[in-house]
Image (spheres, rainbow, N blue to C red):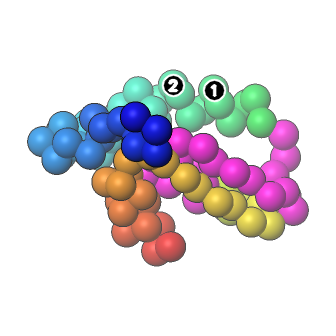
Amino acid sequence: MKGKMKQNIYDNNTFFEKYQEIRAREYNYNNLLEQPNFFTLIPPLKYKVVLDIGCGMGDFAAYCISQGAKHVTGIDISSNMVANAKKRHNS
């Protein structure tokens, strides 16, 4: 299947709606474990250029900007994720 991307589960609207419900909860895995631990592993971002591969809903890209990154590009295979990231972060 040269040139074609495989379907992404996040582009299934039923799945994506449930995923958004989980992520909207204040106490979710991403907020409590994944992101705080990830932040301890990255270097200072001031003046950095960042490529966020698999940017999802754009939260890490927004974090990078809040930490002084010079430029951030987020990409994701899911059109639902990219549309949501743009909506959430006014991109």
Q: Nearer the viewer, residue 5 or 89?
A: 5
Q: Position of residue 21 (x, y in %)?
A: 21, 42
Kindly identify which numbered label has been placed on residue 77: none
Magenta run includes residue 87: no
Q: Nearer the viewer, residue 28 or 54?
A: 54
Above/below status of 60 relative to 29: below
Relative horizontal placement of residue 37, taking residue 34 as reference (left or right): right
Considering the numbered disc 2 on the image, is that residue within a helix, a strand or a loop?
Answer: helix
Residue lying farthest to the front in this orientation = 2
Q: Quadrant of residue 16?
A: top left
- The alpha-carbon separation of the residues under discs 1 and 2 comes to 6 Å
Which quadrant would the N terminus be assigned to in this image?
top left
Kindly identify which numbered label has been placed on residue 37: 1
Magenta run includes residue 60: yes
Considering the numbered disc 1 on the image, is that residue within a helix, a strand or a loop?
Answer: helix
Above/below status of 83 relative to 50: below
Q: Is residue 59 visible?
A: no
Q: Position of residue 24 (x, y in %)?
A: 29, 46
Image marks 1 and 2: residues in contact by CB distance under 8 Å: yes
- Within 10 Å of disc 2 (Cα), the crowding (few <14, some 14-19, many 20+) is few
Relative horizontal placement of residue 25, taking residue 77 as reference (left or right): left
Relative horizontal placement of residue 35, taking residue 24 as reference (left or right): right
Q: Position of residue 55 (x, y in %)?
A: 53, 47
Q: Quadrant of residue 88?
A: bottom left
Residue lying farthest to the left in this orientation = 14
Magenta span of residues: 43-62
* Residue at horizontal 26 percent and vertical 45 percent from the top: 11
Which residue type carries mark 2? Leu
Question: Which residue is tagged 2?
Answer: 33
